[in-house]
Amino acid sequence: MTMSQKFSVNSLIQYGYHFAFTRDSEHGLIAVLLCGNSVATVDPQGEINTSPGLTMRPHN
């Protein structure tokens, strides 16, 4: 992750999100965080998207 992503991820963690995983995309590495049923992503520039439109698979 970039320094910008790390800063943004840390900010989201302070709001109750937890880091789930990263996903490689055509725009670079995307960090995915979860908070209950909410999903947030952080792009390589550190931009936070709290409505990314991702559908998460249920896990047991």
Image (cartoon, grey):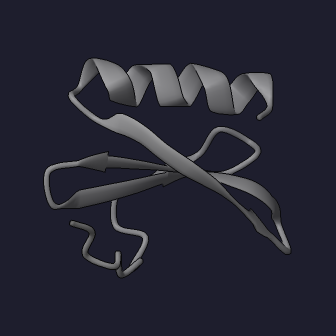
Q: Position of residue 5 (x, y in %)?
A: 66, 33
Q: Position of residue 26 (x, y in %)?
A: 85, 74
Residue under the point 34% across and 79% down: 57
The residue lying furthest to the front in this view is: 60
Give the quadrant of residue 45.
top right
Give the quadrant of residue 23.
bottom right
Q: Nearer the viewer, residue 40 or 48?
A: 40
In the image, 23: left or right of 21? right
Residue 31 against residue 37 in the figure, above or below? above
Q: Nearer the viewer, residue 38 or 45?
A: 38
The residue lying furthest to the left in this view is: 36
In the image, 58: left or right of 20? left
Residue 16 against residue 46 in the figure, above or below? above
Residue under the point 25% across and 75% down: 58
Q: Position of residue 47 (x, y in %)?
A: 59, 45
**In the rendered image, which quarter contains the C terminus?**
bottom left
In the image, 33: left or right of 31? left
Q: Position of residue 17 (x, y in %)?
A: 29, 35
Residue under the point 64% across and 24% down: 6
